Every structure is written in C-alpha cells, then in structure tokens.
Image (cartoon, rainbow, N blue to C red):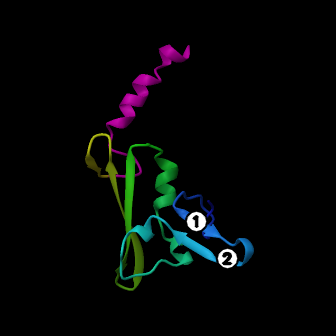
C-alpha cells in the first residue's frame, strides 16, 4: 500500500471506507515503544527502500522508533530466517541466499 510519503510499503495500512480513519504501521505497531507512530514517520522510514532493494523471502524485519537528539529515527534490524543469522546490511541481505538464487537461475538453464 502507498504510504503518506508516497512509497510502497507492505507494512503500512490505511482504511478510510465508510467513515473509518485508520492509519497504522504494522511493523512499528508490533513493538511497544514510548514514541507513537504518526503518518509523518513514513517520510523518515527506511523500510520501503529496503523492501525495494532486497526482495529476499527469508529476510524478516523488526523496527522501532527512537529519538536521537531532537530527531526521531526508525531503526531497522534484519534477520535471515533460512540461515538463522542477523543481517548486517538489510539493503543487500545475508549474502548466502543470493548465490543459491544465482545457481538456480544459471544462464545454461535459461538458454543463453
């Protein structure tokens, strides 16, 4: 679904049908943090960019909202469910899932 910041994110949900006014982030809503989620939080959230850069089905994300100095930030942690290890750079992935995909989709099988 498209966020208020204009990016696609699978964790954002909104419902304005028949008088409802529901807007929520289902990733940040899982955590109990003292800072509340607001629609303007989507402008500083890196999750849509991570999801666009890395579509690995084994990567799970967790996020929480923190305040650093006077600014709010969304901190994201990634975890590879297939290899049971934390992911250092969620934009790239764990580095072990992608070589498997390259071997499955080798040029010999595609016919090139």
Q: Residues within 10 Å of mark 1 (few under 14, many from 20)?
A: some
Q: Residue at x 49, y 18 (%)?
A: 107
| Depicted 20 relative to depicted 54: above or below | below
Q: Nearer the viewer, mark 1 or mark 2?
A: 2
Q: Residue at x 44, y 81 (%)?
A: 36
**Residue 13's disc number:** 1
| Depicted 37 relative to depicted 109: above or below | below
Q: Is residue 42 toward the left or the right of residue 59 in the image?
A: right
Q: Residues within 10 Å of mark 2 (few under 14, many from 20)?
A: few
Tell me, yes or no, if residue 32 can be seen here. yes
Q: Is residue 13 toward the left or the right of residue 77 in the image?
A: right
N-terminal-most mark, 1 or 2: 1
What secondary structure is marked by label 1? strand
Residue 37 pos. (x, y %): 48, 77
**Residue 112's disc number:** none
Q: Residue at x 48, y 14 (%)?
A: 108
What secondary structure is marked by label 2? loop
Q: Residue at x 47, y 24 (%)?
A: 105
Tell me, yes or no, if residue 112 can be seen here. no
Question: Residue 103 lies in what quarter of the image?
Answer: top left
Residue 88 in magenta stretch: no
Which residue is identified by label 2?
Answer: 20
Residue 14 pos. (x, y %): 62, 68
Residue 110 in magenta stretch: yes
Range of magenta residues: 89-112
Quarter of the image where the C terminus is located: top right
């Amino acid at each position: 679904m498209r966020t208020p910041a204009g990016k696609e994110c699978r964790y954002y949900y909104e419902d304005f049908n028949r008088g409802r006014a529901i807007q929520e982030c289902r990733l940040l809503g899982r955590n109990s943090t003292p800072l509340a989620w607001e629609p303007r939080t989507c402008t500083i959230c890196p999750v849509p960019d991570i999801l666009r850069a890395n579509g690995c089905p084994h990567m799970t994300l967790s996020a929480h909202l923190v305040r650093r100095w006077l600014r709010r930030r969304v901190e994201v942690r990634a975890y590879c469910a297939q290899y049971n290890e934390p992911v250092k750079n969620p934009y790239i992935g764990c580095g072990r899932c992608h070589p498997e995909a390259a071997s499955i989709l080798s040029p010999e099988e595609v016919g090139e």
